[in-house]
Amino acid sequence: TGVAMMKFKSPPVNSLSLEFLTEFSISLEKLENNRACRGVIITSAVPKIFSSGLDITEMCGKSMEHYTEFWRAVQEMWLRLYGSNMVTVAAVNGSSPAGGCLVALSCDYRIMAENPKFSIGLNEAQLGIVAPFWFKDTFVNVVGHRIAERSLQLGSLHPAPEAHKLGLVDELVPEEKLMEKAAAVMAQWLALPDHARQLTKTMMRKAVLDRLVAHREEDIKNFITFVSKESIQKSLRMYMEMLKKRK
Amino acid sequence: TGVAMMKFKSPPVNSLSLEFLTEFSISLEKLENNRACRGVIITSAVPKIFSSGLDITEMCGKSMEHYTEFWRAVQEMWLRLYGSNMVTVAAVNGSSPAGGCLVALSCDYRIMAENPKFSIGLNEAQLGIVAPFWFKDTFVNVVGHRIAERSLQLGSLHPAPEAHKLGLVDELVPEEKLMEKAAAVMAQWLALPDHARQLTKTMMRKAVLDRLVAHREEDIKNFITFVSKESIQKSLRMYMEMLKKRK
Amino acid sequence: TGVAMMKFKSPPVNSLSLEFLTEFSISLEKLENNRACRGVIITSAVPKIFSSGLDITEMCGKSMEHYTEFWRAVQEMWLRLYGSNMVTVAAVNGSSPAGGCLVALSCDYRIMAENPKFSIGLNEAQLGIVAPFWFKDTFVNVVGHRIAERSLQLGSLHPAPEAHKLGLVDELVPEEKLMEKAAAVMAQWLALPDHARQLTKTMMRKAVLDRLVAHREEDIKNFITFVSKESIQKSLRMYMEMLKKRK
């Protein structure tokens, strides 16, 4: 059918580790180069969680080289996904904070399971960190400036119904109908001639993609400087402790 | 009353041919230079159709010179209409795809007949072509980035109720009330002092207008290159065949 | 609690005179430099009016030097408020036209008394004048391009329920609950780590703040040229006469 299915399966919470991101980018590249593949549905094989976002262990107590490699991998994933020529549909079947939300925001269409226990948002501020400018740009392109400003400052995690109301996700469906709906949406998007659809997508997203490409090294440097601060390291360690205790 | 009425009357579907566009621009220029004229209501004299958009016969099997002249006329019309100092109200009394939608989007206010059989949208992608960047900019200024991205990629033609929900049109009224409502809206806008209103309009639209002015020749070149491709010519011929059969 | 309360008290209508603006800016600066202060709630001590906006007597029949000083004070207030590191909550307990609306728009959150007799908006066009580009930028960041374009051209004053529907204010509450609600919202925003919240706010607002900083002298010159015109002076005098008669 020309449609690939990508199921995140890195228990317990589909953290975006360096390894995960590298594999994700390679998979996207392979699909992109496969002319038989025209669309990809992204979902999770882990119950209740789509992706918990960037793996905090990659940002704690590691070397500058490691931070550099990690951040480049985050950028790479986003550049490939947001700029993909394929139709990309996120079937958000669980919670999706921070980097997990970015993955969903970077797709062409977002369908979420209508479970109010599932939430989604760029909640970086809650952890004492700041979403990078290109997370913000991607968010603004989806929900507009005002909703983004408020949600980012509050580090909001929006329950599915609220996320839908804000336009963060396009549609809610009962969880058992999620894949069926994703396939139907994909079919609708694939009904369009690829070339015209791809050029249109590029026209809409190029400015934001170009901005990261132009400032990529600077963005890496900013990340390293930020993450190396003792205060930030402390925040992240505390957050990890809290996560461990929750389990 | 200082209000002009412009009724598109080029049966069967008010295609924006080179001749039509030239006449449209000249009429706008005349009204603009007529100090007694402060506003214009744009509507159609052809039943069920506002304007079907750019005349595809102008883009098929013609010379480079013709394409150049045609595209310059499309640009000219938009620069005059989107940048008009007059109050411009679109009374959309029929379907309005592609270039027809652009005409409506370029006005200050859009009222549409609440007939769900009438649809409006920038459906270029459906024909295998891409809306130019300034069609896109005009659209984004009206409905925002997300709705524009989705609608343009899908080449959506939105039935009147949906168009209203998306903000593509400002108001729906029963068809028989359309002109009365347009006059009332016009009166409301004309109650403002011209000078302040015009400067405000310029402030809001200048960035997008300037962008085409700065890239006008490049945009013509892009159009010619694109439309001259054999694959595009084929798409357009197929589309015209389909239209003929429909009749 | 780390929260300051600022109550506008300059009867009869909290006009933003040179003196008022200077005091406002100094107060903001003091709070900003007071590390114990993390947030400020802005409201009015004058019944039925939040602020009537820029004091027109400062713009009528004064010297160039006075206009310069006045306009610089308007800019200064906005730069401080829109760029404040504190959490800023507007408790809009009365009407808030023009510059009064700008004050509310520049805060992080706007709560308005749900009295339909109270209205808010950038109604400059009604007086024959034009809102400066940075009023417009602030407005667009809150309500988006389309709503801003229409509202600014019509110089609309939106009754509270309409303002809420347009997103101009975030929430409506009964007037007697306004301060309680403002305190609750403030607590919610202050629950976030200051540093991350402040950097996020800067990321969202920097482009618009920088634009005025880069064009500040030019903007003053524009204001002087504009306000010195005999036609504008006449409009403003007529408006003042009308206000006097109303009383």
Image (tube, coloured by chain):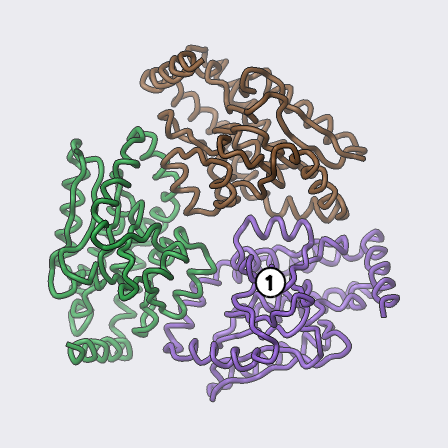
Chain colours: A green, B brown, C purple
Q: Position of residue C169 (x, y in %)?
A: 56, 65
Q: Is residue C10 visible?
A: yes
The amino acid on which the numbered mark 1 sits, given as a three-letter code, is Pro
Q: Is residue B83 above or below residue B19?
A: below
Q: Chain of mark 1?
A: C
Depth check, front residue: C205 or A48: A48
What residue does disc 1 label?
C161
Report the quarter where the C terminus of chain A lies.
bottom left
Report the quarter where the N terminus of chain A lies.
top left
Q: Position of residue B108 (x, y in %)?
A: 63, 41
Residue B141 shown left or right of residue B24 in the figure: left
Q: Position of residue B154 (x, y in %)?
A: 36, 35
Residue A66 shown left or right of residue C225 in the figure: left
Count up the numbered dots.
1
Tell me the crowding category of disc 1: few under 14, some 14 to 19, or many 20 or more residues within 10 angstroms, Cα based.
some
Q: Is residue B147 above or below residue A160?
A: above
The residue that appears at 46% across and 86% down in the rendered structure is C35
Q: Position of residue A189 (x, y in %)?
A: 30, 36
In which quarter of the view is residue B62 placed?
Answer: top left
The residue that appears at 14% across and 46% down in the rendered structure is A27
Depth check, front residue: B218 or C83: C83
Where disc 1 sits, the SS reads helix
Q: Is residue A229 above or below residue A183?
A: below
The residue that appears at 27% across and 34% down in the rendered structure is A190
Q: Is residue B85 visible?
A: no
Depth check, front residue: B210 or A44: A44
In which quarter of the view is residue B34 placed?
Answer: top right
